[in-house]
Image: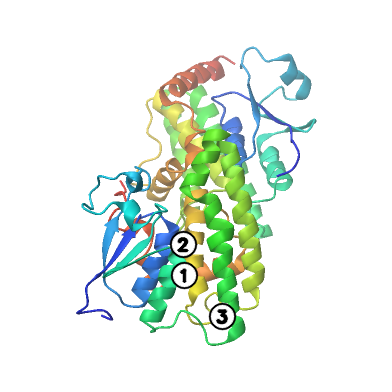
Amino acid sequence: MANSGAEKLKLYSYWRSSCAHRVRIALALKGLEYEYIPVNLLKGDQFNPVNRFDPEDYLTINPMGTVPALVDGDIVISDSFAIIMYLDEKYPEPPLLPRDLHKRAINYQAMSIVLSGIQPHQNLAVIRYIEEKINSEEKTSWVNNAITKGFTALEKLLASSAGKHATGDEIYLADLFLAPQIHGAINRFQINMEPYPTLAKCYESYNDLPAFQNAVPEKQPDAPSTS
Amino acid sequence: MAEKEEVKLLGIWASPFNRRIEMALKLKGIPYDYVEEKLLDKSPLLLELNPIHKKVPVLVHNGKTILESLVILEYIDEAWPHNPILSQDPYERSKARFFAKLIDEQIFDAGFVSMARADEKGREAFVEKTRELIMHLEKELVGKDFFGGKSVGFLDFVAGSMIPFCLERGWEGMGLEVITEEKFPEFKRWVKNMEKIEIVKECIPPREKHIEHMNFMVQRVRSA
């Protein structure tokens, strides 16, 4: 294990959070052990000052109240991109960014489309707000639009750079962001991936990779048990 | 999002042909006005919009009337092309259409119309016939979460609205168990998957009321 001997990493996570999902993949790829600390986004745990990770208040860990957050000794990092870059720089093997400058840029672009172009439009706070203020159809319409726009852009971006995975034959940053996004699109929003053949093929390519398969929401300790 | 679109759906709460339209509209996030019709007291609007068949569902989109549930489903997919419910591939489309017809024609007939008309002994034969037909759907589901693959689509809406969420209620009313876990494990698995989908759940008619309604429909078919 890459970090055996040192104090164990802690990950504040929610089973269904696609942002936490990305970090779970990164930790698995780097061979890092960590303590999984569940934060229940639905119950509003992150806003509850008296909670089960006494004496720490989750908002003191992450003032945004979002997951994931990584604790490495005295260092606390929130935001999936910041966490992943920290992990990539502290534990360089295997590298999450290619050496080629153009390919690196494509990875950053793909990541950004997901990170700011798609996920924020479908996170719990936003969709709850729309459903409450307007109605359920508007929520679905909003999410559909964000996903369609984002996936169409990703499909164009990756069509020429994809190999076995998103930007070549190795796993890179883009894959860590794509996998959870597509998983959520299919399972939570019933999105048909057929209009995005490159993305669909990338998604299939993660099926045989334990780092990806073990990070899925359904396999997390705080996932509800299925009947 | 475009300027205000007028979408109106005329339907009957118990009609599977109507419920499948609602599933499609909800999947695509299309807001619509719903008008509940009464089977035995059809509104002048319905008779005006569908003079040929006088049936629901009727979809009105910006003043244009679209009739026949399978036609309406394809219209919805074409008018609102995001998140498609039918495959782009012609062969897959042809399979979906073929099975939709099988469901609405042969399965609906053997599984309801003929079964209702028959006496107790005759019903056994139609139960067998229905099972034979549904076995074709069973085979289609092997290795898939839904007929549409990983996500729900056209055939899931057609089969779902008709079989588990309509015919099953009729069978229960008639005291028959047609689809068993033993012989139809894939089908049962698919129904469980369907029941987890929010937009499908919202379109399942309430069970007890539906069983009662199906009993009424059985009587109606027998006296026709």
Q: Indicate the quadrant where residue B41 lies.
A: top right
Question: Label 1 to label 3, Cα distance in Å?
Answer: 14 Å
Please state which amino acid type lies under the numbered disc 2.
Pro
**Residue A162 visible in image:** no
Residue highlighted by disc 1? A176
**Residue A196: percent from left, percent from top:** 62, 63
Which chain contains the residue that carries disc 2? A
Q: Quadrant of the C terminus of chain B?
A: top right
| Residue A180 badge | 2
Q: Indicate the quadrant where residue B207 lies.
A: top left
- The local secondary structure at tag 1 comes to helix
Discs 3 and 2 lie in a common subunit: yes
Residue highlighted by disc 3? A104
Which chain contains the residue that carries disc 1? A
The colour scheme of the drawn protein is rainbow
Does the CB distance between marks 2 and 1 fall below 8 Å?
Answer: yes
Please give the name of the residue rendered at 60% of the width and 39% of the height, measured from the top-left corner.
A138
